[in-house]
Amino acid sequence: MRRIRTFRRYFISTANEIYALWLALRDPHASWAARLIALVFAFYVILPLDVIPEPVPLLGIVDDLLAFPVAYFVISRMLPQQLTEVALRHAQATGAGERLWRIFLVVLALLSILWIAAIIGLSITIWRALN
């Protein structure tokens, strides 16, 4: 139970920080360079082009996992600190992290139900094929 609380706390904190970064980038005082890097990163995530393709064992996934924190670090350092602090306070006040946590739980429950249904359906199909 303690691990779930810790994961929940990190999830909410990360969600608030990402939402705060979004709010800060929308502010007129945000630099165009930070916005441009955020746009390039968004295209990197959306488009199927990768620096290291996924079929390369382990490295294909590692470059995607490293892209998120590197992009966040670079973009957040390019924005004025006061702007990011105000955006973070606003994100925490709106409860964005809590809402995303609830959405995450609903999606997790739905995916779990889907997987269980698929496993049961596959088991029944195999059982009938063997009998």
Image (tube, rainbow, N blue to C red):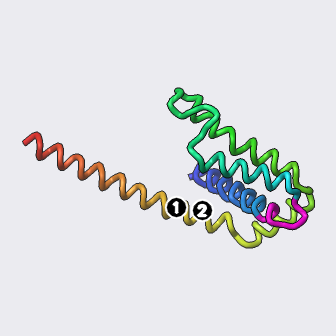
Q: Is residue 41 visible?
A: yes
- Dot 2 crowding, Cα within 10 Å, few <14, some 14–19, many 20+: some
Q: Secondary structure at mark 2?
A: helix
Magenta residues (range): 23-30
**Which residue is at a point 55% across and 60% down the rendered structure image?**
104
Q: How many marks?
A: 2
Residue 36: image x %, image y %? Answer: 79, 52
SS class of the residue under badge 1?
A: helix
Residue 96 in magenta stretch:
no
Looking at the figure, which quarter contains the C terminus? top left
What is the distance, in whole Å, between disc 2 and disc 1 at their CAs? 6 Å
Q: Is residue 25 magenta?
A: yes
User: In terms of image quadrants, where is residue 31?
Assistant: bottom right
Mark 1 Cα shell of 10 Å, populated few (<14), some (14-19), many (≥20)? few
Query: Farthest top residue?
Result: 57
| Front residue (pair 45, 12) | 45
How far from the left and from the top, in percent, is residue 17?
Answer: 75, 57
Query: Horizontally, is 112 left or right of 100 in the view?
Result: left
Q: Position of residue 4 (x, y in %)?
A: 58, 52
Query: What amino acid is found at the position of numbered circle 1 in the picture?
Result: Leu
> Measured from the top left, where is residue 80 in percent x and y?
92, 57
User: Looking at the rendered structure, which numbered label has been put on residue 78?
Assistant: none
What residue is pinned by disc 1?
A: 105
Decide: marks 2, 1 in contact (CB < 8 A)?
yes
Question: What's the residue at 59%, 47% (across, down)?
Answer: 47
Instruction: Indicate the quadrant where residue 101 lies.
Output: bottom right
Q: Which residue lies under the disc numbered 2? A: 101
